[in-house]
Image (spheres, rainbow, N blue to C red):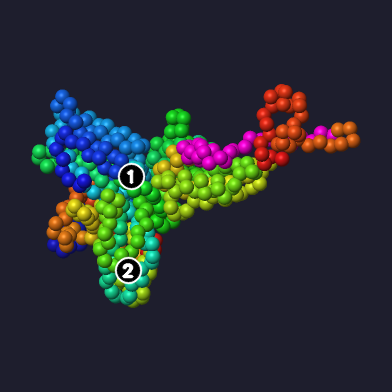
Amino acid sequence: MFDKYTPPFTINYKGHEISVEKEQGNLIYRRTCEYETIEKILLEADGDFLINPIEPVNLPKPITSFLLIDFERPVMISPGSKQKIYLTFPVEMGIFITGKKGEHELIDILTLNRSKYTLYGDPNRGMICRYWKSEIFTSYPNLDTRYEGDIELDIINDTNHWMEVKKSVFNAFGMKIYYGTDRTSMRAFMRIINRHLAETGFMTYTTTPELRRSMEVYTARKIMLSSIKGIMEHGI
Amino acid sequence: MNVTAYMSSLPAIPGIVFSTVGAIIILIVAIFLGKGLTIYLQRSLKDKIDKGHLDIILKAGYYGLITLVIVAFIFPLIGIDRSGLLVTGGVLGIVIGFASQSIVGNLISGFFLVVERPIKIGDQINIDSNTGFVEDINIFSTIIRTYDGLYMRIPNQTVFTSNITNYVANVTRRFEYVVGIRYSDDADKAIRVIRGIIDNEPFALESPSPSIFVDTLGDNSVNIVVRIWAPITEWFEMKTRLLWVIKKTLEEHGIEIPFPQRTVWFSGEGQTGKLSGKEDNYLPEAENDGLPALQEGTR
């Protein structure tokens, strides 16, 4: 599914049909599913289409750049230690048109997951986050990559106390997603500063060489306006 | 020739020259102080006030300081009697004070609004029962575009002294429905159905969690209260859409929203009859007139 396609093409994907047709020098992009039909005309367009996973904070519409992963079971971590766990995250697929010079533009997004949002913090100073509940794994989980990807999370406890972690908040501006034929993955860290404060971020490399880096929607151009770190100041 | 003799040989400098030079020096110092004040105000307020208003404040500060220095220091130096000015100024001040009471009040209120910042441009607010979007916050007044698209100018004094409700100051807000069901319907089932609808709604927040409960046993219905938290940007669209979804889904599950009904007792000859949902208790006249059948659970 995650690949580059040259028009005309048609893909059937879990109830979604994605097709691109050529029509008098224009391209007609069409996606149909049970509940909606999206059609776009790309005028005098000439290029390929790339489908890859993107930061999962866009649907049904982008109102936040934060993803909150709620742990099914809390994790306890000893003082001064660094532990690795695996979480899951919802997969959203971005459909890009790419030009001859490498320029690209997002034209559509789809997901097979149910979207849900939540408030992290209080209604006054908190922030809206995309919500996802994840099981905790201590080794790489085999996932259905149409629905879920994995986050290899290093939890670093910088305090002198045992810490209980129930959730993690990530900023889409820092996300680096890698994908292959049977895996969609991110590598992240969570540094616990105290019981109410932690910092999260992403590694910009993968330890699995066969994985490719995804085209991002929340790109470096916007970093000037937003931090790429996730600051959890309303509890962990 | 000694120094004393030399000095006495110099022509006498008239006092007016000293006064003039002194006045010029004081004026130059005042201008420098005014410039310093301008820079300080510019740095302090540039993030809080837009450029147009900042320019006015800077000019007022600059020329105000210079005027104060002239009146306080230069006038006595060049021999202008300030007592007359004080009397004139006092009378003038009283007149101007009365005349510009509301203007000054609005000005000061505007300053405190800028400092306190209860509202920002673009916010949706309610001031003194006037609701709409804040279009601009000026020195003397605040401009609102009402939801009907009307232009409204509210003096800053009114804004500052009124209760202000800012609908978008927080990131989330809660809204509420009251859903009435028949007494014969299963309230637990209705709650499950409503919870399912809310769970499928992306912007019905997971936390704070929604609350759904039987609130009152009303005259005609069992009233279920549904409280949902939503992002401040999405709540209105969701509120206007979700109630009908709830109504339709409840009906699909055989749960109906009842209409107001009343059970009427007739006092007959030596006996009292009661209208009920059973057909054999219907009055023949009622059936013949095609009145709606009484619903279950309304007796």
Q: Residue at x 39, y 49 (%)?
A: A116
How much space separates mark 2 and mark 1, taking CA atoms? 32 Å
| Extent of the magenta region | B240-267
Q: Quadrant of residue A68?
A: bottom left
As rendered, which of B191 and A176 lies closer to the eye?
Answer: B191
Amino acid type at mark 2: Ile
Query: Relative to A161, is A213 on the left or the right?
Result: left
Marks 2 and 1 in Cβ contact (< 8 Å): no
Which residue corresponds to the image point at 86% horizontal and 33% vertical from the top-left? B268
Looking at the rendered structure, the secondary structure element under dot 1 is loop
Q: Is residue A45 left or right of residue B241?
A: left
**Label 1 belongs to which residue?**
A59
Mark 2 residue element: strand
Q: Is residue A157 above or below residue A72?
A: below
Chain holding disc 2: A
Could you say which is closer to the camera, residue A117 or residue B292?
B292
| Mark in the foreground, 2 or 1 | 1
> The numbered mark 1 sits on a residue in which chain?
A
Quadrant for residue A236, please give it.
bottom left
Rendered location of residue A7, percent (x, y): 15, 35
Pinpoint residue A115: horizontal percent, then vertical percent.
36, 48
Could you tell me residue B26's position as x and y percent?
A: 29, 50
Give the residue at the far top of this rendering.
Answer: B289
Q: Would you place residue A45 above or below residue B60 in this image? A: above
In the displayed image of the protein, which residue is found farthest to the front? B280
Badge 2 is on which residue?
A193
Which mark is first along the chain, 1 or 2?
A: 1
Q: Is residue B105 visible?
A: no
Give, as a three-letter code, the residue at label 1. Leu
Out of A67 and B19, give the one closest to the viewer: A67
Left or right? Give the position of B217 relative to B147. right
